[in-house]
Amino acid sequence: MSLFNTRPSAAQIGLMTARISSVDPATKIVKGSAPAYATVVVSVDGAVALTVTADGSGAWRGFLPAAPNGGQVVSAAASADTSCVVPGGVGLPASVTTLVAMGDSITAGVAASAPANSWVSKVAALLGATATNAGVNGTVLQNSADSGGSPRADNMRDRYAAQMTGASKKALAIIAGGLNDARYTAAPATMNVANYINDYREMLTGLVNGGYPANRIVIVTPHWMPDAGFSNGTTGFTAQTRSGYETYVKAAKDLAREFGCYLADSFAAMQSAAANGVAIMDADAIHPNDAGHDVIMQAVADARLQVRTACVYDSFSGADGDSLTARAGEIGASWTLAFGYTPGTPAPQIAANRLYNTALSSVYAASGQPGSADYEVIATLYCLSSLAGENVGIFGRGVVTGADSRYWARYLQGTGWQLYKTVGGVSTQLGATSPASPMTAGIARRLMLRMVGGAISLWVDGAQLITVTDADIAAAGFSGVRLATAKTATTGIHVEDLLTRPVTPMAS
């Protein structure tokens, strides 16, 4: 007899279909499919077990509270949740090889009955990752002076570089900082939300400069706690108000949007669970118990990429072999061959939720048109292998019909990053080639083309590498991808996503 049975739910009869693909009794992980961004309610013998959100490809996953036995029926039902579409519609990768989680005692697993029951361990199991737990009891994020006049020991701002970058860099970075910053009330002139934001910005900028694309960084909000938790704690960590605490929650959300990384709203998830009668807290009313760690894990699993108002977004999620011209991305992403180019055969296509080209030269424009000529085009490039002379890039202010004109940024394998303009079919390099941040197998880089009036610049992983002044192309035009050198599903540089959005302030 199977360890679990599945049967169609009422939603499977209608348009909003939710299906279960697997249940692992050992790990209690359940996976399935549903319409993109749908809310999925998973039940065991008719009783609701968990609620999750499908990602842009329709995939969903979660932890069951208990392993189902052979006689139980596990079912899933889906409903529309348009609040998840934009901004912030794209979920975490289906799997990563490694992750590092920085935080406080809750990250370290205090009050979990065993290390395997901590939220970090469960997130790692869900993603199939080897986890490095950088949680430290009592730590704060900021390195501001406390009431004793010095920064608190082991603050995250002072230790993140050694534990998350360089030789310690992992495939995914998770930061869960702010609970203790928010609880600390003994030095309001220095230990405050403004300095929390400043130090968090410094950390996020350091992670981006250290090689983490924004879509490999997860911000977890300060966790929810009941009012009783504000009265418990050591010297300085009491007497906070609910409204004062929640300013830190808002700050974490704002930073996720500012940097365009993932947001895991642990505060909202825990608050909702408690309001629905789930006992999620330990006796101290600060640390979550096993059920609370499950809630945090699910909040991280449901993390969504924060995208500012965008005119184009395509995650390139789809079945292997899907053609670029036969798909429509999440926002303004129906694709058209740019003027002057002969379509390759076949057209660029999808492999492992990334875009690659099989023909020598492919320049495709997305359908979403910016409302202004001042905008950014951003793409995550992932290198599977090095192909001599390969180049891949993005463009903006391009034309779809008429004279071949655009600004474009690319990586030329073996040479470096380059910025160009094409006017009337004639291409001219702008500025000098930058050899910084080379692409080798297994490396992902975040490439950005930024156009503000006549200021045209190329950025990689948050660092400006090339900037020029040029006024030859002033109209908004269209944005898109520029791919050259034929490759396969497993070779060369592929494009993980493309985002076009209004110009945003640069992190300092």
Image (cartoon, rainbow, N blue to C red):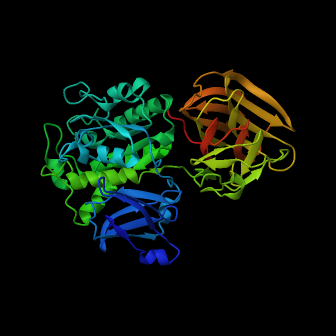
| Any part of residue 67 in sight | yes
The answer to which of 447 and 120 lies nearer the viewer is 120
Q: In the image, is residue 159 above or below residue 255? A: above
Q: Position of residue 337 (x, y in %)?
A: 78, 50
Q: Residue furthest front?
A: 1
Q: Position of residue 373 (x, y in %)?
A: 71, 45
Q: In the image, is residue 58 above or below residue 499? A: below
The answer to which of 425 and 121 lies nearer the viewer is 121
| Any part of residue 476 in sight | no
Residue 184 located left or right of residue 130: left
Residue 501 located left or right of residue 369: left
Q: Residue at x 65, y 52 (%)?
A: 321
Figure label count: 0
Q: Residue at x 70, y 31 (%)?
A: 390
Specify the quadrant of the image occupied by residue 52: bottom left
Residue 23 located left or right of residue 234: right
Q: Position of residue 53 (x, y in %)?
A: 43, 60
Tell me the quarter of the image containing the N terminus.
bottom left
Q: Residue at x 59, y 55 (%)?
A: 319
Q: Residue at x 26, y 37 (%)?
A: 188
Q: Position of residue 25 (x, y in %)?
A: 30, 57
Q: In the image, is residue 206 above or below residue 119? A: above
The answer to which of 434 and 179 lies nearer the viewer is 434
